[in-house]
Image: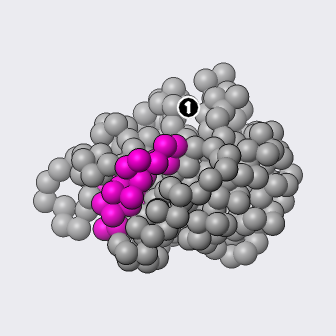
Amino acid sequence: MAKPLLAGNWKMHGTAKTAAKLAADLANSSGDYPELIVFPPYVCIPAVVTELLAAKNIAIGAQNISHHSEGAYTGEISGKMLTDIGCSHVLVGHSERRTNCSESNELVAEKFAAAKRSGLVPILCVGETFEQRQQGQELQVIKSQLDAVVDLVGLETVCDAIVAYEPVWAVGTGETATPEQAQQVHSFIRAELGSGGTDTQILYGGSINADNAAALFAQPDLDGGLVGGASLEAEHFINIAQQIVEQK
Ligand code: PGA
């Protein structure tokens, strides 16, 4: 069984000061919640690291990574730089980067490999667009997104990472996949990972909030969530985290 997990993607919100406050609020939250990972904007990471030094069970990740290890790549951030400032995880293949930054399946695979080279745990995001779902292509699209990474690093390495299913039409839109739609894709991903994927954490993401969390996490192959909007307030995020514990 995969261990429950909740990740919060803070995207391009806030400042170092508000990020530190959010991290402090999370660190001070009481109650029973699973492993948490927060993904602040790059420049806010040091402030968050400072706040979370004493917090057990809250890891810090970055929202992006260069596929290069080092060199003349203006504006890029390497995996080594991320581990150096205290990151343990990194998002790769988020739909906003696939769409807005034209990241191809092959580039996402390179970023995944770069994360592994630096000792970071990648969260590989996959998901179909609305049009692709309308045409019944969702599983095919997700398979090709997974296969690009498997072809480069091998199945075992993907099983050692974290996968997030985020239907593009549900990210930041207020629309969520139904629990049944999510479960269908999660069990497909689990089957694609094979026997090595039994313990792989497969997260759902796309407009999760305190009202829809319980029904989603009641599904057997949803091991946790990747939350955007609702991760920007500690109270909402912890509420969702507690619902995961209740369902698992
Ligand atoms: P959302 O974002 O929860 O705001 O839809 C999810 C994500 O981008 O990971």
Q: Is residue 28 left or right of residue 2?
A: left
Q: Residue most toward the top?
A: 195
Identify which residue, 82 or 245, lies in the foreground: 245
**Is 65 contained in the magenta span?**
yes
Name the secondary structure under disc 1: helix
Q: What residue type is labelled 1?
A: Cys
Q: In this view, does 237 lie above or below 186?
A: below
Residue drawn at 70 percent across, 58 percent down: 240
Residue 96 rendering spot, x and y as whole percentages: 51, 68
Mark 1, residue position = 159
Instruction: Where is residue 18? Give x, y as percent.
Output: 43, 75
Residue 41 magenta? no
Relative image position of residue 115 (x, y in whole percent): 36, 43
Q: Which residue lies furthest to the left in this view?
A: 72
Q: Viewer-proximal residue, 47 or 94? A: 47
Callout 1: few (<14), some (14-19), or many (20+) C-alpha neighbours within 10 Å? many
* Residue 248 image point, x, y percent: 77, 39
The quarter in which the N terminus is drawn is: top right
CB of mark 1 near ligand 1 (< 8 Å) = no
Q: Which residue is drawn at 55% across and 49% down?
A: 36
Q: Which residue is drawn at 30% across and 40% down?
A: 118
* Apparent side of residue 82 relative to residue 102 in the rendered image (left or right): left
Q: In the rendered structure, which segment of residues is drawn in magenta?
A: 43-66
Residue at 76% over, 52% down: 243
Residue 14 sits in which quadrant? Answer: bottom left
Say which of 119 and 169 sits in front: 119
